[in-house]
Amino acid sequence: MRKFDTKVQYLKYKVLREVASQAWNDTLLENLLDIPKIIVPGKTSTMRCCVYKERAILAERVKMAMGGETQNNNVIQVIDIACDECPAAGYEVTDSCRGCLAHRCEDVCKRGAISFDHNHVAHIDKSKCVECGACAKVCPFAAIVNRKRPCQISCKVKAISINEDNAASIDNEKCIQCGACVYQCPFGAITDKSFILNVVDLIKKSENNSKYKVYAMVAPSISSQFTYAKLGQVITGLKKLGFFTVVEAALGADMVAHAESKELSEKGFLTSSCCPAFVQYVKSAFPKLLPLVSHNLSPMATLAKYIKETDKTAKIVFIGPCTAKKAEAQLETVKPYVDAVLTFEELQALYDSRNIDITTLEEDVLDNASYFGRIFARSGGLTDAVKQGLIEQKIDFELKPIACDGIEECRIALLKKNKNILDANFIEGMACTGGCIGGAGCLTHGEKNKSEVDKYGREALEKTISDAISVL
């Protein structure tokens, strides 16, 4: 069974696996320059014009696997040398242009960017074009099209532009670090920084030092991943990697649902704070609405804080589908509690870097949370949990929620709230389509993921939020 959706993911995985493998063996620095040759041996390349360019790109991928550019705080970064195969973005005249006499495109262009050759075929001067699209609207043959790159199409917050070198450029002020562009880039030219070396270092130190223990905190969307194995085997694999124990971030979701439902009833209106990309979007695009965001930490940070307060020797590694979690872990409010973040892609690389075949392992049990905490992983789950939180605490409050599935729906809801025309008192904001199960760091993406999360939720021994958090 395939472990990844795309070959781009597989290439990224191979780099991560090799970097981690060298780190386990304490040979990373001495073999650093050889890693591209290990991944692409011989003198032929099936990915680029020549093996030498591919290895140059791989060297940049290795840097990202080792933490990326430290001067750039954004966890999403562009590998410029790999971003050279997409066509120039913007409005272009296609072969459908019939060289008509009307020249409506020329008449409507206020910048004088349209000219014609000897066959009366239109051409656009990119130095004058301001991408208004007026020419495309009036062309009777629909011969003028707006060509956008996959990264630009996927970025719903318009944080990606094309620079003078024809490479993608990310506006860090607009970027919410959701990773949609990472998953959609067909050349892997946009990727997320990895902190896999931090995790290897934590585990190695814990194995040699009994003064602290490394906890693996897994996101509930793990139930839809590693489809080639059983979830219990995934958990056993984490312990075999060297983690002291495995806990569910879904327990943190139960804690947040309990607290957030109470906060909502007290304030009368609230947006969720669980999705770091959504919270960042509010900060950058709707700063006036920031006071309406729940003051609760995310489930990841909430549970990590509780664990560290309970066990002073604890180190926390969060494992999930989200690139934005890597950015959240760098926040001053979260940094004391979360020591590193891995995606599911990186966890697969970590398993294989130690030659752990999880399909051969015994099944362990993961049972720290309720049904409602576990369904946080998909769109609408957080809303259901807040509703349940109100019921269990016997709070008399009429909940009028809106569950926003993807950042475009979030934008519409926030615009309405900004104009005081939103008929809701609770906004569930999920930046990724489908919720966390649509995160860029997933091994696989698909409709089946939602049903897997719901099934996983129903298997919880604790049927209520109160039951789950009563053990705390």
Image (cartoon, grey):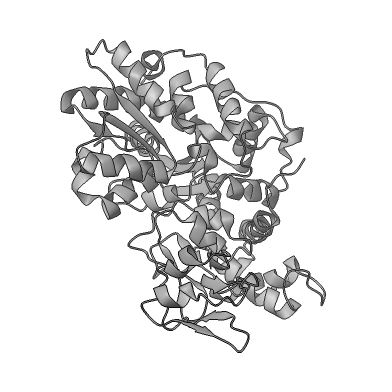
The percent coordinates of residue 280 (x first, y second) are: 33, 50
The percent coordinates of residue 442 (x first, y second) are: 58, 44
- Quadrant where the C terminus is found in the figure: top left
Q: Residue at x 59, y 21 (%)?
A: 455
The percent coordinates of residue 395 (x first, y second) are: 23, 13
Q: Observer-nearest residue: 91 or 153?
A: 91
- Quadrant where the N terminus is found in the figure: top right
Q: Is residue 107 left or right of residue 121?
A: left
Residue extending farthest to the front is: 101
Would you say residue 336 is visible in this rendering?
A: no
Q: Observer-nearest residue: 323 or 246?
A: 323
Q: Is residue 383 left or right of residue 39?
A: left
Q: How many marks?
A: 0
Q: Residue at x 38, y 66 (%)?
A: 171
Query: Height in image: 70 above or below 129?
Result: above
Residue 129, by quadrant, is bottom left
Residue 221, by quadrant, is top right
Q: Observer-nearest residue: 323 or 268?
A: 268
Q: Observer-nearest residue: 360 or 83?
A: 83
Q: Is residue 83 left or right of residue 47?
A: left
The percent coordinates of residue 449 (x first, y second) are: 60, 33
Q: Residue at x 74, y 78 (%)?
A: 49
Query: Height in image: 375 above or below 304?
Result: above
Would you say residue 115 is visible in this rendering?
A: yes
Residue 23, by quadrant, is bottom right
Residue extending farthest to the bottom is: 118
Q: Residue at x 82, y 74 (%)?
A: 42
Query: Height in image: 280 above or below 109?
Result: above
